[in-house]
Structure formats: structure tokens, C-alpha cells
Image (cartoon, grey):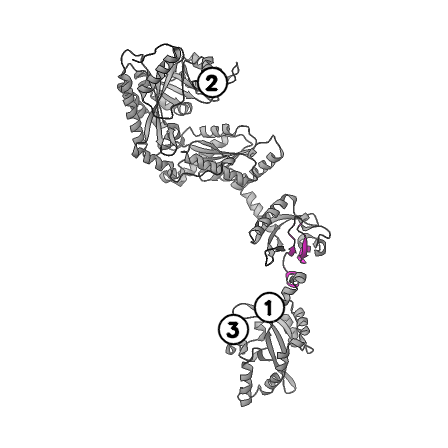
Amino acid sequence: MNPDTARTMAGSEKHSNQHLRMLGGLVDELAATVGRADGPRAVALAAVLDSIDVVVFAMSRSSSLVYLNAAWERLSGYPEAQTRGTSLMDYVHPRDQAAVSRYLGDEQRDKEGLVARWLVRDGSCLRLSLRICVLSGGSEQAGFVGTLSNVTGRVLAEDVREASHRTLSILIDNLPGMVYRGRNNPDWTMEFVSQGAAELTGYQPRDLINNRQLPYGALIVAADRQQVWDSVQASLRENRHFELTYRIRTAQGTEKWVLERGRGNFSASGELLGLEGFITDITQEKRAELRLQRENLYETPEGLPTRLLFLDRLERALLRSRHSAGCRCAVLLVSLDRFARLRATHGAEFVERVTADVGRRFRDSLHPVDSLSRWRQDEFAVLLDDTDDAGAVARQLKNSMRFPIVDGDTETYLTASISIALGRSGYAGAGEMMRDAEAAMARAKELGGARIETADRSGGAWRAAPSSIEEELAHAVDKAQFGLAFTPVIAMATNSPAAVDVRLFWEHPRRGRLPASEFFGIAEHLPMVKALKGWYINALLAQAAAFRERPAGNQPLRMHAEVAGRCMLEPGFLGRMVTQLRAAAGPGVPLALEIPEDMLRDCVSVLRESLPVLQAQDVAFIIDVQHERDPPLDILPELPVYALRLDDALLRGKGGEADPTRALIAIARASGVHLIARCGTDAEALAAARRHACDFHQAPPARTAVDLEGALRALSHSEARAAGEPLPLH
């Protein structure tokens, strides 16, 4: 409250200050006896003055205090002995010192006194009513005697009664911004704004109050209005303060960034009466922040966009998607598997070089309009601005990890887990889309990594399993949770068994049977891989011996042994494995190693080194082809390839001369390579296999463990019954 205004208030309360008038005689007598403080009359007067609640003081002409009664210490907290000799002005609030000084020097001062702010020892501020009279000494003024009474409660009560009209306008008009009281509606109708509105918005307060010229909401930049509304409503629902930044357009047409802090004003019954708050200009700070952001939009040394720039691009892509049915965006989150173990083994500098190499691979695999960003130390984020097949891009990125990362004499093989979030799912913003991508990533990690998962908004967020896949694998090795699955391969011409696939599986206690493709890539980077490889090779040798012991009258069955991981193709290990398999199976059992196309291409140089032992042991390869875009046809003539296994999806292609599967088959035929159709036993699937002139067909691997001989016997009897003639195994 302004001291001059307080003076008027003090004058209006003339009749309520009877206690001050009662002290008049005591004050006059104090002036007459101040020079005889040791006299009986002075002692008695001092005792009387110490007993009252009003501060009585005497000071010199220079405002130095020479006497204070006991009420001073009770009110201010300062002992009277320490205060004597100090200046009265030392206890006046700095903003009220000028008014108090004028009051002391005014010979025509108001006899009802002056209300001002005074500082007390605990750091708080009190409103005290000051009243003085001249202390005469001879013919000249010798000083003053006066009283101080606490009117803080009365002043604050008056402020509250007048808040709806004045809202402390005298004080807040000096603030660097606009204080307001308004209604909670989309226009933000103002009932009061301070004088700071003129400098902030360019409009006078009267122009904004009750929307006289325009509502305050019209000043907010259109792109920010919904954000402002949503943020304020959320705070009101929780009855908490709100703080937000947004842009306004001033009367001069310039754009400003503002910071608004406020809260709802609720009645005792919980009814919202309005909004109160403060809005200030932060344009300079915001421009400096944006300038700093622009200077740091790209990571070094990779030169990739920062997370901030990536999110901005994603927001814009989502905005375009909402306004254009033909524009489709997607986000890929790519996480490097077992990154922490790699860091612990080789150190931070090595890992940074490896990650930079991975970033270059990803960037080379993407279209120039796509955005690649380093999301975390072990993760990259990819924005596909407009795509029809995010899964194809994800597979391309995954395949780019097939080749080793060479750093000096160290070769590192990494796998990546990839999650996909599609913009057409109706995301409200970039943050929501990235949260779904991270939830799908948690799912990919739970399932063992090195896989691609798509976010499913209807299914809720994924939650990772409490234990890691590495811990589960170690437990599986200890508990021998692995086994072999057998799948017969049937000759199309005779409808009789010609071979048997032998595949490794993990009988997972929670997720059921897992093929080697879902866990061996992880295991081969862990210490337990040696034990796992040993178990698998011993199991294969036992089955090779079983093939050898089949009765001599049976047609020899070819044994197809799965190559579960890259580590099995190392020259020394591969040579020992095929030599041991040939010894166990004997010369009469045809042997073939099954290998996925991507693993074959990654390890072709290693396989070339193993050609002599493969040829010496008469062991061939079966290449599992699942994608038609990049089959390893160029190396077919170099290796002893027995057959290509074609996935059902390839066999059910469009057909015709343009069908890429036909071109693949033609090249295989020219190289003398057989074709195996992996398909169901229904008529349509078998018809597709015959249409492409496949030599064999086989069903997908069984979901339960089966006995090799029992499976062959059951299959043969079933087919014999279907054909109406016997097909004995023995």
C-alpha cells in the first residue's frame, strides 16, 4: 500500500484512535521530564509507558532514538538497549522511507499520523501507524516524541475488502508484466488487468477488460491456443498452480513469448470464481534459448540431428499426416543388443567408434528425406516421412548389421532390436508416438532381441519380463531346457520321406518352444555359448548315428542339420563339426547343413576357407530363402549348395513372367540346385509348390517334441492310407 494512501486511511479513522489521544498527556510529560530521567517522576512515567502495548519513543532532531518503551522490543524483536542511538529510518521499509522523511519534516503534518511499513527482526514486515510531536528544548526544536501502533491486521483486512476493485494496483503497476484477474473461458475474459498490460500487449487495460476492444484470448497465437487451454484446465482440475509459455501478437503486430503463472480462485464450497495470475515478457530469453538450440541441432562427430530436432520434425510430419490422407509417416526405434556388455568388455571409446560406424550404416540404408537421430547411447531413432512399408525399412536396417564392425584387429558382430510406430494410428503428438515405440521395444527385448516389433495401440503398453534374456539363457543351460525338433521332408514325385530336418529349440518355461533364430544370436555373445554348442553338437552326433543304424533295406534319408548361429561357421569349428557328423553318420547317409540366406552372405568368405573339408566330407548346404529382394544367388556356383528352401509367401506370388520367384527358380535350376517348399499340407499350398516345380515340401517345424522314428512312421502310414497303398519304412 502506498504511504500517501495509508495517510488518508489514517485520517479517516480519527475517531477509532482513542488510545493515541489518551497518550497525549503522557507524551507531553515525557517531553518535560526527558532531561531528568533519574527522578522519581521519570521512573514512574517509564513504568507506566512500559506497561502499554503502543511503542513510545523519543528521538533527536537527526532521527537518532534516545528512548523507547518496552513495547518496542515486544513488537520489533530488537532490544531497547541495542536500538538506542540508531536512526528511526533504519527500521522503515525502503519504499516508505521517503514518505516518513516528508512526514517528519512537515510542520503541517497530519495530526492523525502516517501508516507505513516497518521491518522487524524476524524479516517480516508490519504496518505501523506513526504519530509524532515536537520535543522542544529552549527556543529551538530539540527532537521528536512519538508513538507506533500496530495496524497490520486492520490494513490487511481493508486490502482484502477492496481486492476486487483495486487488487493492489498501486503496487503491481510497477511490476514488469501484467497482473490479471479473469474468467475461465476460451476468450480469457479479463475483469482486471494492471497497467503493465500496455507495455506487454500494446493495448491499454480498458481495451482488454470485459473484452471492450478484444479478448485477451485473441492475442494468443492460434497455434498455441489449444495448448494454453488444455494446460490451464488440467491445473484447475487438480487445484494447483499453472505455469506455461506461449506466444502472443501485440497491437503493433509483433510476436512475443510470454511466461504465465497463475491459479484458480475457488470459494469455500469449491466453486471456481475465476483466475488470477501474472504474465511477463520472456521474448529475449526465449530467443536466446532457440538460438542456442539452433546452434546445437546436430550431434558431432556423426552429424546426426539431435533429439530436439528429431522431435520437431516428427511433430511436423504428424501435422502433415493429419491434414493429408496420402502422407504417411512412421518412427523406427533401433536398439543395439547387449550394448552394456560391449562397453564393459571394450571400454567407452571403442563403443563410441562402433556406434558411429553403425550410424553411418543406417544413414546409408535410408532415403535422403528420412531423419536419423541418436536417441540414446545404444539407440537410434528413424523418422520415415512418407512410407508404405516401414517393415521393409526395418528389415533393411537389421540386415545392415550382418557384416562385422572392424576396429583395428577387432571384429564385432552386433544385432539390433527394432520397434515400429505408425503415424496413421492417430497420435496426438511426438511424445505419445515415441512412448509407443519404446513400449514395442520393451516387447522386442523381452522376446530375446534381434527382432522387429510393431506398436499396437489397442493392446496397451508392453512390459518387459522381470529377468533378462541373458539370465534366462544361463538358467536354461544349467537346467538343460534345450531339445531337437524333427520335420520330415517329402518328395513331391513319390510322396515319400526323403529327408529329415533336425532343429534346435528352447523349451522356455513361459513362452513355450522357441526356435534357435530367436535366442542363439544372443547366446553366441555370452559365456554359456560354449556349453550350448557342445550340447547341440553332441545331440546332432547322436541323431547322425541313429540315421546310420536304420535298416539297410530302407532308402537312405538325408539329414538336414540346422546351423544355429554364426559362431558355428568359424573355420576350425565347422571343420571339426562336419568331420564328426560324417564319422557318426557313416558314408551312406547324405548330410546337409541348413543356413539362412543372410547368415550365408555374411559368412561367405569364411565358408570359402572351409570348402576343402566340406568337399572331403561330402557335406552340402541348404539355403533358407525367406525374402525375394536379395537372395544370395551370386554365390550359388561357389559352394556345394544342395537345395533352396522357399517360404510359402514366395510360392504364393503373383505368377507370370514378372514374378521374381520364377527368376529365382530359373537360376537355381541352371545351377543344379533342388527346391524345397516350406508350406502346409493343404491342397492350395501343395498346388503352389507343384506350380513352381518344387522337388520337395515340408511343413513348418512341430510345436511339440516328437520322436524321429515315430514321426516318420506316422507320416508314412498316413500318406499310405491317403494313397491307398503301403509305404513301409522297414
If you read the primary sequence from the N terminus, does the residue marked by circle 3 or circle 2 appear first?
Answer: 3
If you read the primary sequence from the N terminus, does the residue marked by circle 3 or circle 1 appear first?
Answer: 3
Q: Position of residue 693 (x, y in %)?
A: 44, 12
Q: Is residue 78 left or right of residue 603?
A: right
In the displayed structure, 122 sits above or below 226; it is below
**What kind of element bears circle 1?**
helix
Asked whether the residues under the numbered discs 1 and 2 touch, taking CB atoms below 8 Å apart as contact, a structural biologist would say no
Q: Nearer the viewer, residue 270 or 234?
A: 270
Query: Residue flagged by tag 2: what amino acid is it?
Result: Leu
Q: Quadrant of the N terminus?
A: bottom right
Question: What numbered label is drawn on residue 336?
Answer: none
For label 1, the crowd category at 10 Å Cα-Cα, with few meaning under 14, some 14 to 19 and many 20 or more, is: few
| Alpha carbon separation for disc pair 3 and 2 | 95 Å
According to the picture, the residue beneath numbered tag 1 turns out to be: 94
| Alpha carbon separation for disc pair 3 and 1 | 19 Å
The image quarter in which residue 532 lies: top left
Q: Nearer the viewer, residue 201 or 705?
A: 705
Residue under the point 56% across and 85% down: 45
Q: Bounds of the magenta span?
A: 170-198
Asked whether the residues under the numbered discs 3 and 2 touch, taking CB atoms below 8 Å apart as contact, a structural biologist would say no
In the displayed structure, 215 sits above or below 608; it is below
In the displayed structure, 186 sits above or below 456; it is below
According to the picture, the residue beneath numbered tag 3 turns out to be: 77
According to the picture, the residue beneath numbered tag 2 turns out to be: 651
